[in-house]
Image (spheres, helix red, strand yellow):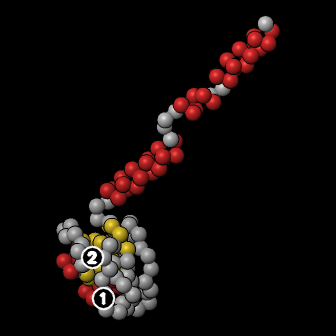
Amino acid sequence: MKSFIISALALALLGTSGVGVASADPRNPVAEARQDLREARQDRRQENRWERRAIKRYKAGKYQAPKGYYARRWTKGQRLPIAYRNRMYVVDHRNYGLRYPPRGYHYVRVGNDVVLTAIASGLIASVVFDLFED
């Protein structure tokens, strides 16, 4: 009788330890975390409709940075120096599959990237990375 009670008690404790519950849970926390990450990435992509990674890369002439400057990676919110506001750096959006720039903005080539900047202030609204080949 004593062994029966001990066995029943052990079985009851084993059943509440979560072993049986965890094995019956159909959810996969790793898959859920990956799905949440995918959704967050999608939200970030849609956050700024002007930014995109270049899918098609174009051949363009050799890039010559303004005197005293070098090509570097610019980011949204920075100001492009006035030397880049020269006509030779302005990119025609129609030739490269870019969206029509908003009023008061234009695209400027900086190295292999294209930045959408405010014409008057040089404030960068977005960046298209690696649009041009070396």
Residues 119 and 7: in front is 7
Q: Is 123 drawn above or below residue 95 in the view shown?
A: above
Residues 63 and 78: in front is 63
Query: Which part of the image, by quadrant, shows the N terminus?
Result: top right
**Proximity of marks 1 and 2: CB atoms separated by less than 8 Å:** no
- Extreme-top residue of the structure: 1
For residue 102, which quarter of the picture? bottom left
Residue at 24% across, 78% down:
96
Q: Which residue is mark 2?
A: 107
Q: Position of residue 85 (x, y in %)?
A: 30, 82
Disc 2 residue type (three-letter): Tyr
Sequence-wise, which precedes: disc 1 or disc 2?
A: 1
Residue at 27% across, 88% down:
88
Q: Is residue 76 visible?
A: yes
User: Disc count in the image?
Assistant: 2
Residues 10 and 105: in front is 10
Q: Position of residue 2 (x, y in %)?
A: 80, 9
For residue 71, which quarter of the picture? bottom left
Q: Residues within 10 Å of mark 2 (few under 14, many from 20)?
A: many
Q: Which mark is residue 23?
A: none
Q: Is residue 94 left or right of residue 128?
A: left
Q: Position of residue 69 (x, y in %)?
A: 43, 86
Mark 2: which secondary structure? strand
Q: Position of residue 55 (x, y in %)?
A: 32, 73
Q: Which mark is residue 60?
A: 1
